[in-house]
Image: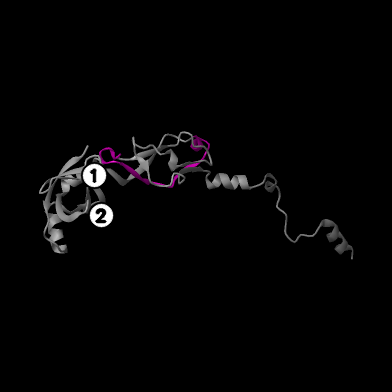
Amino acid sequence: MAEEVTVEIRTDQGKRRIRRLRKAGKTPAVLYGHGQASVSLAVPTEQLEAVIRHGSRVVKLRGALQEQAIIRELQWDIYGLEILHVDFVRVYEHEMVEIKVPLELRGEAPGVKEGGVLEQLVHEVRIQCDVNVIPEKVYVSVHGLGLNGSVSLAAVELPPKAKLLDDPETVVVQCIAPKEMEEEEAIPAAASGEPELIGRKPEQEEEKEEEE
């Protein structure tokens, strides 16, 4: 469900004015899309942060504009704590949109019980879906993942009528053996005996040299 965000038209430009805007508890934003002119906006930071906490991607802009939009991009400070800018893209009701969503693993992999370690290679995925059913995240099950096995994007769980846009053969997660296990398997059993001294002469040759 789309959350409402109150917006104002922003005419002031420049770094100083942007800093004053942020000090006043508002975040600069821009709205574009559908071949219409882009509009500079100001959004109450508190409202925007609430939307992000709830994992919402679709918002209803109210106040100076009456539009529905998706959050296309967020710009954060270097510490990842403060939102510096937000991009909104106009969308229509039930419009099919392309969007990136987080990907998480679901379940316990049998390979971990065998001593393996899970290595997740993909953390977000591109999908196409109805704007009203954009998922907060998508999942890949690892219930059948054994040691030295892998799971590809073809196994990702998508909402109804959603379409995967990334290569389905891409490996999402693999269960690999720790280095300790690999090293143990690489050492042959015979190697545990006494090591051969390089350059040492056979005993018979040593006896002949003493006789001479």
**Which percent across, then down, holds residue 52?**
24, 44
Residue 111 colored in magenta in the image:
yes
Residue nearest the observer in this picture, 16 or 64 = 64
- Residue at 19%, 46% in the rendered image: 48
- The kind of residue tagged 1 is Ile
Residue nearest the observer in this picture, 93 or 190 = 93
Residue 51 colored in magenta in the image:
no
Crowd tier of the residue under label 2, counting other residues whose Cα lies within 10 Å: few below 14, some 14–19, many 20 or above? few
Q: Which residue is mark 2?
A: 75
- Residue 157's quadrant in the figure? top left
Q: How many marks?
A: 2
Q: Which residue is mark 1?
A: 52
Q: Tell which circle, 1 or 2, labels the residue nearer the N-terminal end.
A: 1
- The kind of residue tagged 2 is Gln
**Which percent across, then down, holds residue 6?**
13, 46
Magenta extent: 110-135
**Which percent across, then down, holds residue 189?**
68, 44
Q: Is residue 96 above or below residue 30?
A: above
- Residue at 59%, 48% in the rendered image: 183
Image quarter where the C terminus lies is: bottom right
Q: Circle 2 — which element? A: strand
Image check: 191 left or right of 119? right
**Which percent across, then down, holds residue 74?**
25, 52
Q: Circle 1 — which element? A: helix
Residue nearest the observer in this picture, 43 or 190 = 43
